Image: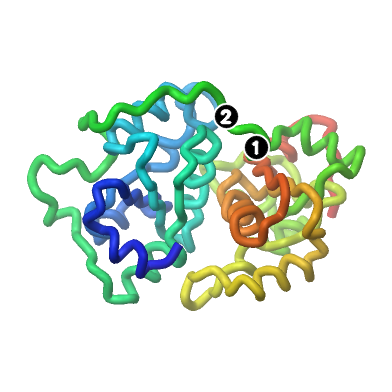
Amino acid sequence: MGREWLGDHLDDPSVRVLQVDEDECAFEVGHVPGARYVCWHEDLVSKHCRDVVGPVELAELMAGLDVSQDTTVVVYGDQMNLWAAYAWWVLRLWGHSDVRLLDGGYAAWARSGLPMVAASSLVSGTPPATTGQAGSAYPVPLGQVQGLRARRADVEAAREDGGATIVDVRDAAGYRGEVPLGGLSAPLTGAIGAGHIPGALSLPWTSLVDAESGLLLPTERLADVVAEAGVPPDRPVIAYCELGASSALVCLVLGEILGHPAVANYDGSWLEWAATIGLPVAR
């Protein structure tokens, strides 16, 4: 979604803006007026195992952000919306239907001259983050939306029967196995191999974003880039990266913008695949 729309809806009580960054200090430097901060590795993942946040915790998070089931949630962040896209996917996975990604994220908003607020200027008692303030009631989700998430078994099945196109969205060096550990860095290392899932196509997520502006490419160009990577427009897709964040952004592009059917995020991604005994790796 565009900055103009959000600029016109900053005072709309039915809209809640969430900033999700890799740099945890970015929110204090400046943020969209009224935005709340969400920490991806504290708020969006399970505290008990490697998984997405559970339904009870998700409901508590949404209530603390004063989000109801009917709220339009707009997410944005740094790193060309990398973790904001993950937030978009997690919320969609748990059934929140009206979630939108602010095109260009933090950098595009700041460059446009639109209003920014520093954390130090917040009114006392206004919560900048996710804790301490119970707002709108939010029901505990009954289950995850089917078709948005791929498990390792789904990827193995796709390799066997060709029922879905597997897409590797890491950079080309990671795909070719030229980067140790597939591009992961401490403290998130865990994959023991370099390369890619055999049969996966290479579609670097950065090829879908204008490097200068941080905005997604125009729709026609997005379609061209995806086609050049060999991704059929009429087949289900399973996307993966290192941890499931940049692949979430590609899922949004393929499913929401280009209309590909049955686009699923393999959030186990390279960290799970390359650390699993016996699974094949290609270079």
Q: Amino acid at mark 2?
A: Gln
Residue 144, numbered label: 2
Residue at horizontal 46%, vertical 64%? 103
At label 2, counting other C-alpha atoms closer than 10 Å, the crowd grade (few under 14, some 14-19, many 20 or more) is: some
Nearest to the eye among marks 1 and 2: give it. Answer: 2
Q: CA distance from mark 1 to mark 2?
A: 9 Å
Where is the C terminus found, in terms of image quarters? bottom right
Would you say residue 271 is visible in this rendering? Answer: no
Q: Amino acid at mark 1?
A: Arg
Residue 231 x, y percent position in the rendering: 79, 60
Residue 134 x, y percent position in the rendering: 23, 29
Residue at horizontal 45%, vertical 45%? 98
Where is the N terminus found, in terms of image quarters? bottom left
Residue 216, numbered label: none
Q: Are marks 1 and 2 in contact (CB under 8 Å)?
A: yes
Would you say residue 121 is visible in this rendering? Answer: yes
Residue at horizontal 58%, vertical 74%? 218
